[in-house]
Amino acid sequence: MMVKDLLLEIKDLRVNFYTYRGVVKALNGVNLKIYKGEFFGLVGETGCGKSVTASGVLNLVQNPGKIERGEIIFKGRDLLKMSKEEIREKIRGKEITMIMQYPVSALNPVMNNGDQIAEGLIANKNMSEREAKKRVIELLREVNIPEPEKIVRQYPHQLSGGMAQRVMIAMMLSTEPSLLIADEPTTALDVSI
């Protein structure tokens, strides 16, 4: 039997939202393990905490939410003990990427699709602009975008929800992360995927 490498372990994660009406316990003791090379699906009804769990991994829980306690161990390090700056510099967008629930709103509306993907390649993979642009076309082909040369020059508002989601997937795959989180991956999915 082959021993799998533990990639992510969440222990007793508790997240509360503080509202004028009182405290909402969004997560009350979430525990899970994800191993290298594994596909893991978190399924539940609307409002059960799937997105809060995903956001919590990258310490992106928005106000009035607060991670109260727990551990998020990624490759042996507790992400909750790291500063937000350290997570941003070393983890988010490099080791762990996240495809947001609404891809059109997650993309920069004043930057064309190609430049958005290339920006991450230049910053995180030390590619030249020319190398990055070539790799962007390859990535868009990998996610089955027709006419990628055209799509790179377009802006997010010119794409359907499904096409925007594919651009987002290409962007998140571009840094070759160890962990890819997809929040509501079928929300804007095209029938052809």
Image: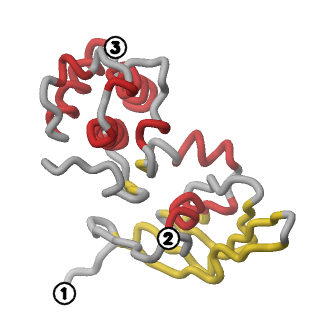
Nearer the viewer's eye, disc 1 or disc 3?
A: 3
Disc 1 packing (10 Å; few <14; some 14–19; many ≥20): few
Tag of residue 129: 3
User: What's under tag 1, amino acid-wise?
Assistant: Met
Q: Amino acid at mark 3?
A: Glu
Q: Is residue 177 above or below residue 132?
A: below
Q: CA distance from mark 2 to mark 3?
A: 42 Å
1 or 3: tag closer to the N-terminus: 1
**Image color mode:** secondary structure
Asked whether 121 or 66 is in front, the reply is 66
Q: Where is residue 135, by image quadrant?
A: top left
- Indicate whether 22 appears above or below 89: below
Instruction: Please provide percent x and percent y for residue 35.
Output: 35, 72
Q: Amino acid at mark 2?
A: Thr
Instruction: Residue at 20% x, 25% y: name it.
Output: 137
Local SS, label 1? loop
Residue in view at x 39 percent, y 26 percent: 157
Q: Residues within 10 Å of mark 3 (few under 14, many from 20)?
A: some
Image coordinates of residue 179 in percent, x first then y, are 39, 57
Q: CA distance from mark 1 to mark 3?
A: 45 Å
* Mark identifier at residue 1: 1
